[in-house]
Image (cartoon, rainbow, N blue to C red):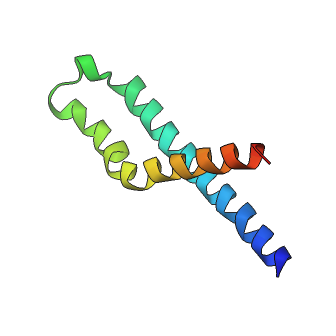
Amino acid sequence: MEAVVNFLKIAAVIVASLITLVFLVLIIVARIGCPIQKCVGLDGDIWMIPLFFSVVGVPAVLILAATLFFSSRR
């Protein structure tokens, strides 16, 4: 049973890492494509993808940070 729990912990960290990576890449691409200060009109649509993905991306970043923080304290 302990092996299954350890496998699920590792799987959760891998999934959270992948979601975090995709979320950060989307933000970087939008930032390079259209900086917020200069972004007007239809060019601002590039920020819609990271905005909609933030519903999943932000919790994934928090879960990954908490997992890494608590695993380093052991």
Give the camera-side residue of 24 and 69.
Answer: 69
Q: Nearer the viewer, residue 24 or 32?
A: 24
Q: Residue furthest toward the front?
A: 74
Q: Residue at x 52, y 47 (%)?
A: 62
State left or right for residue 43 relative to residue 20.
left
Which residue is pictured at 28% across the width and 44% down the height? 48
Residue at 85 percent of width and 75 percent of height:
3
Q: Residue furthest right?
A: 3
Quadrant of image for the N terminus: bottom right
**Where is residue 51 shown, x and y percent of the image?**
32, 45
Q: Position of residue 37 (x, y in %)?
A: 25, 17
Relative to residue 65, is residue 19 depicted above or below? below
Name which quarter of the figure residue 34 lies in. top left
Q: Judge by depth and name the residue closer to the eye, 30 or 71.
A: 71
Residue 8: x and y in percent read 72, 70
Give the number of marks: 0
Vertical placement of residue 20 versus 28, above or below: below
Question: Splitting the image into 4 quarters, where does residue 30 fall?
Answer: top left
Furthest toward the top, the residue is 38
Q: Position of residue 31 (x, y in %)?
A: 39, 26
| Residue located farthest toward the bottom when viewing the structure as drawn | 1
- Left/right of residue 4 with respect to residue 70 in the rendered view: right
Quarter occupied by residue 33 = top left
